[in-house]
Amino acid sequence: MRRDVSLEEISDGKLYGLNDMVKADCQDCVGCWDCCLGMGDTVVLDPLDVHRLCVNLGKSPEELFAGELSLGVMDGNILPYLTMTGKEERCAFLDGQGRCRIHSFRPGICRLFPLGRYYDENTRTHQYFLQVHECRKTNRSKIKVKKWIDVSNVKQYEAFVDDWHYFLRDVQEILYHTEDTEKIRSLNLYVLRRFYQSPYDPAEDFYQQFYERLAEGKEILIEEQNMLKK
């Protein structure tokens, strides 16, 4: 999700890499679940997030979209996000004691918090920044970024995050430069169905399956870009 604010407004002014120490550790967030309330449509999910939810909950994408996940328009793309429920707008995966029921396989945005990603348009990679207004915990301790994110094969994961981010950006460029409502609809539905609603085989490597789909998606974008030039 794009933010129309400067980095200085929302961070401590620093950018962090995987091996940097950052003051992000909330000591298991005991007694606090503010970041799981009232988040609206901001906890946007990538294909790996949805795949992990399917595998670990034993549910199909269709079942998740019928309950815990919702769809919204993010910068022109139709994308899934965690559903917020009730008067408190609680995350659908928050239990009665304010604890996360999916913590071990929580989505990437949840893993990051209170960190965010800063994308470099020139290198098509990202670094991390510390959000200074989002978490009310003031006694956070320092932790290495890659330990805080807590994912296996972190370099492969980071490459996936970058490739997915910039694929969506390329989709957005097409959406922004056409007034053909049918084209906008069909491209959005393609992304949603191909990358989210079509299950990935849990017995096979997720990344290999994703990149096969991504290669196909890029071919479609090339065709669409060429049509816009005519």
Image (cartoon, grey):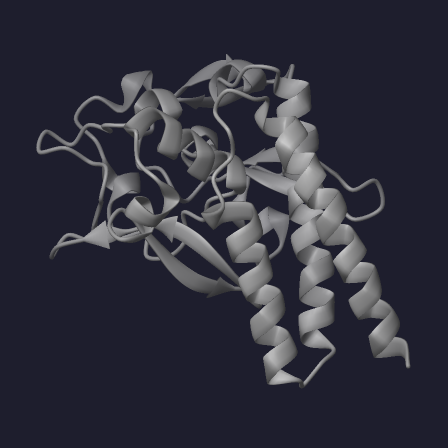
Task: Give 155 or 65, whichever is nearer the viewer.
Answer: 65
Return the x and y of residue 211 as percentages of the image width and height: 70, 36
Classify residue 224 by image quadrant: bottom right
Residue in the picture at 27% in, 41% down: 36
Q: Is residue 189 above or below residue 137?
A: below
Task: Give 123 or 230, whichever is nearer the viewer.
Answer: 230
Task: Give the quadrant of the C terminus.
Answer: bottom right
Return the x and y of residue 70 as percentages of the image width and height: 34, 56
Residue in the picture at 23% in, 35% down: 33
Q: Is residue 81 visible?
A: yes
Task: Give the quadrant of the N terminus.
Answer: bottom right
Identity of the residue furthest to the left in this view: 96
Q: Is residue 59 above or below residue 64?
A: above
Q: Is residue 143 above or below residue 161?
A: above
Return the x and y of residue 205 as percentages of the image width and height: 59, 22
Residue in the picture at 66% in, 33% down: 160
Drawn side of residue 165 relative to residue 204, left or right: right
